[in-house]
Amino acid sequence: MTASIEDAYQDGNALAGPLREIFAVDMTAAEGRCASCGLTGPLASLRVYGPEPGWVARCPGCEEVLLRLVRGPQAAWLDLRGIVNLRISLPAEAEAAGA
Amino acid sequence: MSAQRTAWRDARLVAARAETGAARTLVFKIPGWPGHLAGQHVDVRLTAEDGYSTQRSYSIASATDGDLVELTVQNVPDGEVSPYLVEVLEVGDEVEIRGPVGGWFVWRPSSERPVLLVGGGSGIVPLMAMIRARRQAAGRTPFRLVYSVREPGQRFYAGELRRHDPADAGLDVAYLYTRAVPDGWPRPAGRLTVADLNTHGWPADFEPDCYVCGPTGFVETAADILIALGHDPRRIRTERFGPTGG
C-alpha cells in the first residue's frame, strides 16, 4: 500500500488507548473546542500524527495543534494548548461498569 | 475499571484464518477480558528480545464472546507490526493486548435508529463487529452495508456475508469495486460516488446513524457525500487509518 500525503494521518480514535491510560473515562467522544478557530467536535475527529516520537493531534478545520502526548517509561507529557475546553460525558455508574 | 482497562494482558493466539492473500483473522484468548462494544479497538504491543517494543491499534472484528477476541489484520508491507501478525505469529504464541478502548465509533444494540455502514478495504473490520453484535442480539434495526474494495478477491468475510443467516434479516449488503469487477457486474469499476450512497444508503429523512471506516481519502469522500445528501454531520461517525496502521 502506497501511502499518499492525505493518508499520512490517522484520527483521534487512535488516541483512545493512550488517553485511557491517563483519564478515568473514554476521551475520544469528549467534545473539544479549538482555541484557534472555534470548531467544536469530538476528539475522535482530530487529525492525528504518531505514535513516534509522540502523538500530535491537529484541528480538522484549521490544522492548529490541539494536543500533544508523549509517553515515557515513567511518565506521560500531555499538552492541551489548543483546546479551550472539553465536554466529557460522564455516564451513570451502571453503564460505566459495563463495556 | 480504569486500571483494568489500560493494563496490558497476555493474549494467546488460539486460531487463525486467512481472509485474503494479505489479511488474516486472529483469534486471541485473553483471560479476564471484560467484554466490548462493537466498533471498539485494542492496542497490540510486541516486544523484541532486546526490549524494543512497539504498538498498534486494531479494531475488534468479533462480537463479545467470553475471553475470545478476534482481530483481522491487513498486511502493510514494510509495516512494523502487521507483517508479524499476518505472516509470523503462530497458534500458541502470545502478544500483549490492552483494551477495549474507544467510545466514539461504537454501535450499541439498544439503539433503534437505522444504520448505514460504509467501509473501504480493511475498514470493514469494526463494521463487521457491528453486524455480528446485531446478529448476536437478534437485533431488528435495519442495517445497510456499502463495502468498497479493489476487486472481489479482496473482500473480507465474503462467505459469512453471503450466507444470509436468518439472524441477518434486515441487513442489505452492496459491494463496490474500484479496480476490477466480476463478469456481468452492472457497476463499472470505480471509486465511491454520490450515486452509490444515494442508491445503497438510507434517505437522510430516515435519520440513520452512519459509520464510515477506511483509508483517510475514502473516509473524507464518503463523509462529504453523506453531508451533501443531507445527512446530519452529528450522525456521521468516522474512523480513519493512516499508513502506520502497519
Image (spheres, helix red, strand yellow):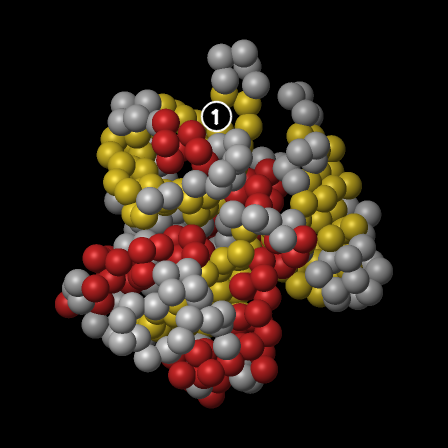
Is residue B205 shown above or below B72?
below
* Name of the residue lying farthest toward the right: A36
- Which x, y percent locates residue A19? 61, 41
- Which x, y percent locates residue B242? 58, 49
* Residue beneath the point at 27% across and 76% down: B184
- Which x, y percent locates residue B114? 38, 76
Provide the residue designation for mark 1: B46
* Residue beneath the point at 43% across and 41% down: B75
Q: Is residue A87 left or right of residue A65?
A: left
Is residue A8 shown above or below B140?
above
- Considering depth in this image, is A63 or B115 the residue closer to the camera? A63
Q: Amino acid at mark 1?
A: Leu
* Residue beneath the point at 30% across and 75% down: B185
Check the residue under mark 1 and report the chain it is in: B
- Which x, y percent locates residue B152? 32, 61
Can residue B66 be seen at all in this image of the molecule?
Answer: no
Can residue B86 be seen at all in this image of the molecule?
Answer: yes
- Considering depth in this image, is B232 or B3 the residue closer to the camera? B232
Picture quadrant where residue B224 is located: bottom right
Total labels: the figure holds 1
* Name of the residue lying farthest toward the top: B50
Label 1 crowd (10 A; few <14 / some 14-19 / many >=20): some
Per the image, label 1 sits on a secondary structure element best described as strand
* Residue beneath the point at 82% across and 65% down: A37
